[in-house]
Image (spheres, helix red, strand yellow):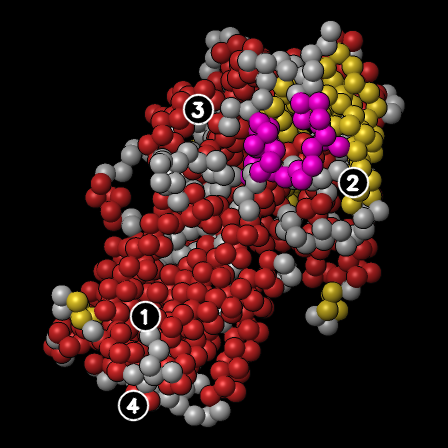
Amino acid sequence: MAPAATAGLRNASKRFGGTIALAEASFDLLPGEVLALLGENGAGKSTCVKLLAGVYRPDSGAVIIDGQPVDHWSPLEAQRRGIAVMHQHPGLFGDLTVFENIFVGHMPRRALGSIDYDRMREEARALLEVVGLSCAPEDRLNQLRTSEQQLVEIARALSVNAKVLIMDEPTAALSQREVERLFAVVAQLRARQVAMMFVGHRMEEIFRIADRIAVLRDGHLIGVKPAAELDRDQAVQMMIGRPLKAIYPQWESKPGDEVLAVSGLTRDEAFRDVSFSVRAGEIVGLGGLVGSGRTEIARVLFGIDQPTAGTITLAGSEVSFADPPAAMAAGIAYVSEDRLGQSLVMDFPILANASLPVIEKATFAGLVMRRQELALVEPHLKRLKLKFRSFDQPVKTLSGGNQQKVVLSKWLATHPRLLILDEPTQGIDVESKSEVHSMIAELAQQGLAIILISSELPELVSMCDRIVVLREGEVTGEFSRGDVDQERVIRAATDADNVEAGRALAAPAHAGEAESREAQPSFLQRLLRQRELGLVAAMAVVALPVMAVNPRMISAENLTAVAMDAALLMIVAVAQMLVLLTRNIDLSVASVIGLSAYGAASFMHGHPEASILLGIAVACGIGLACGALNGLVVTLGRVPAIVVTLGSLSVFRGLNSLWAGGKQISADQVPQDWLDMTSARLAGIPAVILIALVCVVVIGVALRYLPVGRELYAIGSNPDGASLIGIRKTALVLGAFMLAGLLAGFDGALWASRYATIDARVALGFELTVIAAVVVGGVAIRGGAGSVLGVVLGALTLLVIQNGLTLVRVDPLWLQGVYGLVILLAVGVDTVIGRRTLQARRRR
């Protein structure tokens, strides 16, 4: 008797507009078995994955768990029911640490609900050892290579102790050794009776790992058969509906004149003394391990990076390219290995992506002419048999194979004489792969010079006229078509004495990576890298000269005034940080402060006998309502936050003006207790400073030690990834806006107490100061990064600058300009740091 299904689909269908993504598909995932899901790109495989993962709900039919259909299906519910997913494009969070990535969404907690960091680190170390990744759990994810990040995705899937494991192309970015490690993990899970589904394109992997094979074609399930009853040709025929011609075309190579020659090419810490040539009509392959220098050479040839030595000769003339446009002008095109991050603008339509490199040829009087744009790219898209609904379809809605076709057509539209292809068939189905290979051969026959970088040995050996093999940045072998085989390439790439020792082609063994990593920085080096130290230094640079000119800067009276102003700025800056972390912005913050301040002062004026707590409550209520309005329009209305809050900035300020009617509320019109609220002292410290410190500490602790705080960072770092793992993105973004509004309202009450005289102009233009404090403090405009301490120091830095300029009698009209320059400087520093991080990652 067959075991009961742990999970599956029953007559499940899914439509997107008029497109049928999946039609009445039924299959079961059985305990202790691996079901392989095969199909071309766009056949419905990812739809099946997302239905089982709770990302989609079926339009008809059902998701089955333990034999029963489920209702109210979501990623969070799928996790609760024991389903773990390794998504095709890892939904990871580059700004978080490795161990946070593994456990985000289901972080272990202590008794009071705080995060159990010690347990997370301990369990993360064990999981990293299982998947074979040699890195510290505390490393930032964005410091890891793509293949290492895929291993973190695997570790995360294992962390939930699932009874169902779904693997959506988990090996696309892995080396053979990493694949072996994954398959060892699968064997362990099979012994533990975990039900598994494996989605992939590599037939050798499918037939090695699968117990049963399900085949999809055009959204329909063609059949489910035991792997032992199928051979590869039958499986491919089921996928495409006909026998497949040879994956690698046969053609006669006729190389012409030399197009490219590099001699002694070197880039420090990447590769050295590399020499080779490419002729017209010739395909030259670059083989080797990931990190051997293949991609780095391509980046230098395309002008992205600059060589430190050597020469590049193009068509007989020595050249150097300062940037990619210069390389493109010389007739070089580069298809990057990272199509999502470097080759496509995912939110743009197909046509806009395909025409980007040649868009100037489709313009008239500065306007893009659609007919000319189509004429430039349509022939190439047709040649590659792109499957799409409309040229206006966002490219992110295409399958991986069709996305790659858009990338290829984009560069073919430039009519290059040298085409550099970096992993052109990674992650695409067998038929698309065959089409790409045929196109490459056709281009070579037409006289195009081609450099092919690939981690698939059969592709290199079958497609290339010559293969240049690199190891650790040096050329270790060069082979012609007639005298090359996979074993010789492996030996040259790995310095192996036998083929088995070299099975790690495409990546180094992680066991040995620890030695190649940069030495761990000392405590002093880590301290000097902290942005907060830079802010302290910036304050000192401003304060010391001002002190020499005007000693009043360090007087008790001046320091107290600056600290009280800083307290008001800190509260609202931390509020802005909450919104920015989620990849949004609130431009209405100053208007909320003004409206809340006037509302609180007006209430206390009209009810002088009332408790000051009621006045604070009025201000907080106004702020909360404003924040809720902003958040609801952003989350439910799906309107960009910058548009919403730019509008609400004027609306709230207008309401304030109407309410005030040109009148002001002065100090003698409100109770003395209200004025004393911020000026009263405790242990000699003004109350407003203590209140601000409490607010800042509470929010800092929540962001650091509560799961919801780390989830806010995750949303900003990768919104789509947050949705995939069940983080309540809508609720948390709405909550961030509401809490920010609440804090702005509270700040308005303190403002009304501190400055006494209140009218419709309160905090006018203050939003620039708030945003400057947050950005200078290190909070990324793109979301997902920043610290409360940085924001506090950013606020202090701005006020020290303001105070210093005032004391040396600089015209206050210059202040806003100075703030603008400070913002630009902060963004510039972030850009430099980001580039250095990326370069360090590439060197690894």
Residue at numbered disc 2: 59
Q: CA distance from mark 4 to mark 1?
A: 22 Å
Q: Earlier in the sequence, mark 1 or mark 3?
A: 3
Left or right: residue 433 versus residue 98 is right
Q: CA distance from mark 1 to mark 3?
A: 45 Å
Are the residues tagged 2 and 3 within 8 Å (C-beta)? no
| Quadrant of residue 79 within the rendered picture | top right
For disc 1, the neighbor class at 10 Å (few under 14, some 14 to 19, many from 20) is many
Q: Quadrant of the C terminus?
A: top left
Left or right: residue 531 versus residue 311 is left
Q: Amino acid at mark 2?
A: Asp
Residue at numbered disc 1: 568
Q: Earlier in the sequence, mark 4 or mark 3?
A: 3
Are the residues tagged 4 and 1 within 8 Å (C-beta)? no
Residue at numbered disc 4: 668
For discs 4 and 1, the disc positioned in front in the rendered view: 4
x and y percentages locating residue 406 in the rendered image: 72, 44
Residue at numbered disc 3: 127
Q: Quadrant of the N terminus?
A: top right
For disc 3, the neighbor class at 10 Å (few under 14, some 14 to 19, many from 20) is many
Q: Amino acid at mark 4?
A: Asp
| First to last magenta residue range | 62-91
Q: Is residue 683 above or below residue 46?
A: below
x and y percentages locating residue 21 in the rendered image: 79, 38
Does residue 315 appear in the picture of this structure? no
